[in-house]
Image: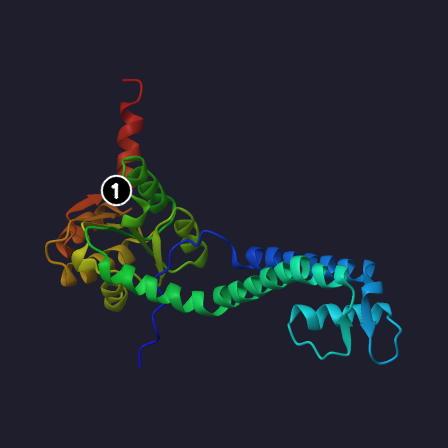
Amino acid sequence: MAAPLSPLTRRSLASPWRTLGIRSGLALALLVTAFCLLWFDRDGLRDNLDGNLTVADVIYFTMITITTVGYGDIVPVSEKARLIDAFLITPIRLFLWLIFLGTAFDLVFRRAWERMRMKQIQKDLCGHVVIAGFGQNGATAAQCLLERGVAPANLVVIDCSEVACARAEALGAAVIQGDASSDAILAAVRISAASRLIVSAGRDDTGILIVLSARKLAPLLPIAVTVRNHDNEDIAEAAGASTVINPVAVTGALLAGAGA
């Protein structure tokens, strides 16, 4: 049975851990504020058990008030205490509930929403540029495409390296971690609907294999591939590459013409 594919992903606008930390700090600050308000007005509270309010009692009353439990053992009796509860503690309670619900949404529902959103992005991919291999050449190609006005959302990067995928995701591209020569991976990025494929796998044999796989799924797709060995240029063309680029030969030609 084939292993499950890595999901198609795209950069998130905010770190979930940073957001969680900020919300936790805000919730703690609101709880401390509520405690301080009740502590400084503790004379307006009545303890129906022993009539003596301690720090622990106020902490307890703060928590049951914020959570709207209200056992009735400690109650506000003065007009001032009731106004504080109505106009200061109640807004704090509402803000805390919003924080808790928002955090639950981010940690649970948002993940499900992101999976659905990425499936929709994957379904809607059309006319995009697929870059197989996000090493130095692949990253440079992506940067050039962005400078030429290609939207980041129209870039899809395939790479086996988690680090390379993270770099591509930081640019705003959709990424999928896996082997670009796999039919399943190519189908996942909708290679048949792409506008072109750029292959920079780092190895000639891997690049040629990717070209063969892509050409099988997309017979008319323009494919550009880099090869390092001159003897492999004809093989890459025979495999179905539309454009074959030898970085070594190009660099040599540029050097030979420099200063001429």
Quadrant (top left/top right/bottom left/bottom right) for the C terminus = top left
Residue 21 in the image: state x and y as whole percent.
61, 58
Q: How is the image coloured?
A: rainbow
In the rendered image, which quarter is residue 176 located in?
bottom left
Do we see residue 81 in this rendering?
yes
Q: For numbered disc 1, what is the local secondary structure?
A: loop
Above/below status of 254 relative to 74: above
Which quadrant of the rendered structure holds the N terminus? bottom left
Residue in the picture at 16% in, 51% down:
241
Between residue 27 and residue 21, name the one nearer to us.
Answer: 27
Q: Is residue 24 visible?
A: no
Q: Residues within 10 Å of mark 1 (few under 14, many from 20)?
A: some
Q: Residue at x 13, y 54 (%)?
A: 238
Residue 109 place in picture, x, y as percent = 44, 69
Residue 260 higher or lower than 104, as above or below: above
> 113 or 246: nearer the eye?
113
Q: Nearer the viewer, residue 2 or 82?
A: 82
Q: Describe residue 245's horizontal placement relative to residue 139 as left or right.
A: left
- The residue that label 1 is drawn on is 246
**Residue 32 found in image quarter:** bottom right
Residue at the extreme front of the image, as rendered? 79
Where does residue 243 sit, x and y in percent of width and height?
17, 45
Left or right, 247 with reference to 217: right
Q: Which residue corresponds to the image point at 31% horizontal and 42% vertical from the top-left?
A: 141
Residue sitting nearer the eye, 88 or 105? 88
Amino acid type of disc 1? Answer: Asn
